[in-house]
Amino acid sequence: MSKLFLVPTPVGNLGDMTYRGVEVLRSVDLILAEDTRTSRVLMQHYGIDTPLQSYHIFNEHQTVASLVERLLGGATIAVVTDAGTPGISDPGFLLVREAVRAGVEVECLPGATAFVPALIDSGLPCDRFTFMGFLPHKKGRQTALQALADEQRTMVVYESPYRLVKLLEELVAVLGEERQVSVSREISKLHAETVRGTLAEVLAHFRQKEVKGEIVVVVAGKQ
């Protein structure tokens, strides 16, 4: 019976993989991986020998029709990304949408995603929040930043380590130096770090060091 699974993978520590996630990856006919080299490390760690196929933002539009056709033919397929839950700022949404339209059963397993631990670790209100993902790099960036100014919910943003200081500088310009913020990086890894304080304080901290790892920025909403 055909089925499409979305399987979360660890954002850092390989021990965060769930038992059920391993079972699903062992049982399906094919695993679609954002980067087969990265995913192969995880597969080898858990003794998973299911065939891997590359599936990322640069080929998903070209391959989605053939993948849905394969699902309709009775295949079971799992989607994994380099880290976290597929579809959350990673490939997955397009295939899910087309599979649903074609009447294929879809199931997303619960598991690792970066923004949940970062949000809870921040100490900022997490009963109501808005997830922004990655802000636009160029076109539309200023509009997106300005839209944050009046947001009353806690805001969660993903950022590259190479652009973190720039983002914090932009947030200072839009929200002011005293707005509370929390920056988490290398979540669940050996050198995991969460820095909390005002935008001015956290900006000063990261200006003084080389930033590494994937970044989650959590910003307090407007009071």
Image: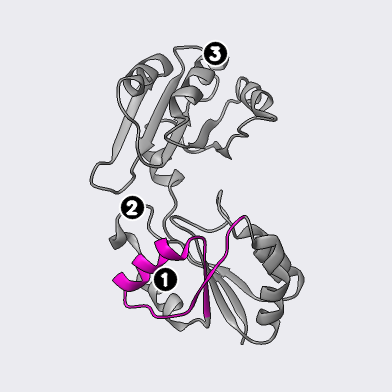
Q: Real-space Cα distance between discs 2 and 1?
A: 16 Å
According to the image, label 1 marks what residue? 21
Q: Earlier in the sequence, mark 2 or mark 3?
A: 2
At x 37%, y 78%, the residue is 48
At x 68%, y 68%, the residue is 63
- The secondary element bearing badge 1 is classed as helix
Region rendered in magenta? 30-57
Residue 173: give its label: 3
Q: Is residue 36 in the magenta section?
A: yes
Name, please, the residue furthest toward the right.
101
Quick one: 120 or 90, which is closer to the camera? Answer: 90
According to the image, label 2 marks what residue? 12
- The secondary element bearing badge 3 is classed as helix
Instruction: Give the percent coordinates (x, y) of residue 206.
Output: 35, 24
- The amino acid on which the numbered mark 2 sits, given as a three-letter code, is Gly
In this rendering, does residue 50 appear at all?
yes
Instruction: Give the percent coordinates (x, y) of residue 21.
Output: 42, 71
Q: What colouring method underlies this structural image?
A: one colour
- The amino acid on which the numbered mark 1 sits, given as a three-letter code, is Gly
